[in-house]
Amino acid sequence: MAEDTGMFTVSQTIGSVLCCKCGITMQPNAANMCTRCLQSEIDITEGLQKQVTIVHCPECNKYLQPPKTWTGAELESKKLLSFCIRRLKNLNKVRLVNAEFVWTEPHSKRIKVKLKVRKEVLNGALLEQSYTVEYVVQDQMCETCSRAQVNPNQWVAVVQLRQHVTHRRTFFYLEQLILKQDAAKSAIRVRQMDQGIDFFFNNRSHALKFVEFLGKYVPIRTRSDKQLISHDPKSNSYNYNYTFSVEISPICREDLICLPPKVAASLGNPGPLVICNKVSSSISLLDPFTLRQSFLDADQYWRSNFKALMSSRQLVEYIVLDVEAISSEVNVGGSRCLLADAQIARVSDFGKNDTIFNVRTHLGHILNAGDYALGYDLCNTNSNDIELDKYKGLVLPEVILIKKSYEEKRQKKRGKPRTWKLRSLNMDIDSAAKGGGGSDEKMDSEYEQFLRDLEENPDLRFNLSLYRNKDYQPSELASVVDGEDPPSIPLDELLADLDLSDGDGDDDETIDLDSIRG
Amino acid sequence: MATRLQYENNCEIGVFSKLTNAYCLVAIGGSENFYSTFEAELADVIPVVKTSIAGTRIIGRMCAGNKKGLLLPHNTTDQELQHLRNSLPDSVVVQRIEERLSALGNCISCNDHVALTHPDLDKETEELIADVLGVEVFRQTVAGNILVGSYCTFSNIGGLVHPHTSIEDLDELSTLLQVPLVAGTVNRGSDVIAAGLTVNDWTAFCGSDTTATELSVIESVFKLREAKPSALVDEMRKSLIDTYV
């Protein structure tokens, strides 16, 4: 500082003094004793532990931090070093400067750590000293390993997810959601049952978290129960098995619903026939004739608990002969709708007879003459719905169109692989719960339908991750195809897949429909 | 010849005593051991006076003096002043001075010819020092410390300074004081030299914690090994041919 102001300062050479104990010449320090004399006089490691016992589980290679935490660590790793240092008491009296392992034989059950500590002594002199701490490793199996040894299939909590419908579309969608959010990473087993999936957990809170995750994406109703497995009367501890029974509402996308009068009244009287167009934590219902959208919360739905009138299995294909828009295009809940009058005929009737229907539809924005559409054939169905009977004097439309069909265009692409693929969850298939052999083809066609749904609906893809299919080569023939292509997913929405396999893994990564069947 | 002693189990001798070539002041203690050690060593040669200054026992740090005079702080009581005037030889001028820094022992370090003072001492005090003690006054610091009276001690023969003093400072001080100086410690590594050590031309007293190494340094720089009371040395010089050590 003095140099900065330009003042002249004399350079100071430090003189030497004699150490007050042994008399050798040394540079003066705060204690005025040479380091040897200081060390001989003062031992700063006094009172620190030099031998400690630590407990290790040989099965899962974890070390115990009492009273209950087990931390996994490899020998001579940073985690093990920090664990060993944490186990030392009284280390806050000195400052730790350096710590490292001294090599010991792995089978010797001893871990040696050399620590360098620093402490202030006498009148301000800092003394540094290194010493070795020896850890004796005791082997003891941890709780989880001993429980697993006794009964490998042991679980503490189970989430039984069920949906009482005849298809598995919701479960395919949920499977993809779970994979994307990693919600089932704490599940020890996943089991596919008839009309549902069971998830097994080792911890009640994991199961609870999973149930809450489900509640965000589908409307559910839960019940929980517990069963006493064992109890220790001396320490008053009880071991339970917790069961969460989760039921998903049977209303799915594209279902036709006749609302019970009470529900219709609470929603502002939409026409009793509504289409369900989106299911998330609440059900969104669209009246196809007035283009009004209403929402039903999970609680609201389960209070009235109505079922769908017709579901997507019963869709019939129609060909559109003429479309005439009635009103302008509206934006209903994020998607566009256009009220139009359409002249349609069933594909099965087309050419054979002259049965033509004039219907009102909300799909005017995408339908043109010559398109194919899927809809519910109300005039030909015999529905035994109680709700329908409650409405006296209700005139049912003949056909309600639900969506556009790309079947013709898909014919051209049949057999060619898609540009994208999905991952699948590792499930055990309960063979006893499965139906007969015919369900295999049913599953395949349902999955294929689910993939097509994903291609057609961008909002369905929103929450999922889709991966680029390495096997797909864009063919040269594609440019020859005239007319529209069926909707496909743009490449920038696809993620490059993680190559977790050992290199010959391309076969593992393509969609293997066998993995679903098992 | 250096003696090791304690004042009531405390090794800071220089706080409780003041030793010059003409007299010795000693604090009043609970037991007589302190006083009797000084007496045993010095009684034949110079008066050893028990006193207090300003009612305190820390007389070594409150007053400053040499064989020509003694300076006392402003808070010395009249009785103490009178007692000292009566007990000390007539050649010693006892003077009470008005100075803001009243711990004169910490601010002034002197022998019979030169004095080092605290840099912030008043001008009148400086003149008084030059007058009463008959010395040349230099304002100095020792190893960056302004309390020169605490961190260095010197007699007419040699001096001991704070251990962290640099070589340049040592040379400078040595030139000013015209005596050989050495940097060292006292009382097992303590750097407050004047508190642990009190010295005159033929004898020294230090705290009992002083190690043998420190003692040998003290004895060598103050040349105490062959020392005898100065009066005798002058006499013997004429007849001495050789000295066996």
Image: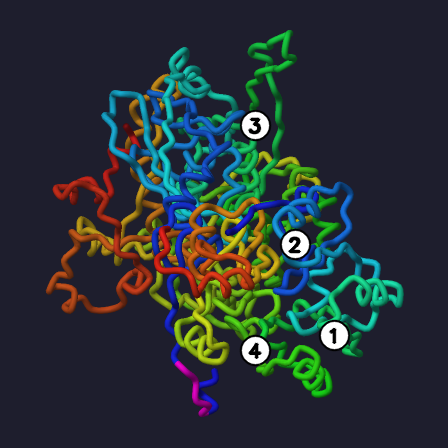
Q: Is the Cβ of the residue at disc 2 closer than 8 Å to that at disc 3?
A: no
Q: Residue at x 68, y 80 (%)?
A: B129
Q: Nearer the viewer, residue A208 or A446?
A: A208
Q: Main secondary structure of the magenta part?
A: loop
In the rendered structure, the answer to whether residue A516 lies left or right of residue A64 reads left
Labels 4 and 3 positioned on one and the same chain: no
Query: Which quadrant of the rendered structure holds the C terminus of chain A?
Result: top left
Task: Name the residue carrying label 4.
Answer: B114
Q: Inspect the image, locate mark 2, and give the three-letter code of the amino acid beneath it.
A: Gly
Query: Which label number is shown at residue A245?
Result: 3
- Read off the residue under disc 1: B93
- Magenta residues span A6-10
- Residue appearing at x 45%, y 88% in the figure: A4
Q: Earlier in the sequence, mark 2 or mark 3?
A: 3
Label 1 neighbour load within 10 Å: few <14, some 14-19, many 20+: some
Q: What is the x, y in percent for residue A56? A: 38, 23
Check contact, mark 2 vs mark 4: CB within 8 A.
no
- Classify mark 2: residues with Cα within 10 Å, few (<14), some (14-19) or many (20+): some
Image side of residue A298 versus residue A25, left or right: right
Disc 4 sits on a residue from what chain? B
Is A419 on the left or on the right of A177, as rendered?
left
Can the viewer see residue A155 in this picture?
Answer: yes
| Distance (Cα) linking label 1 and label 3 | 107 Å
The answer to if A8 sits in the magenta stretch is yes
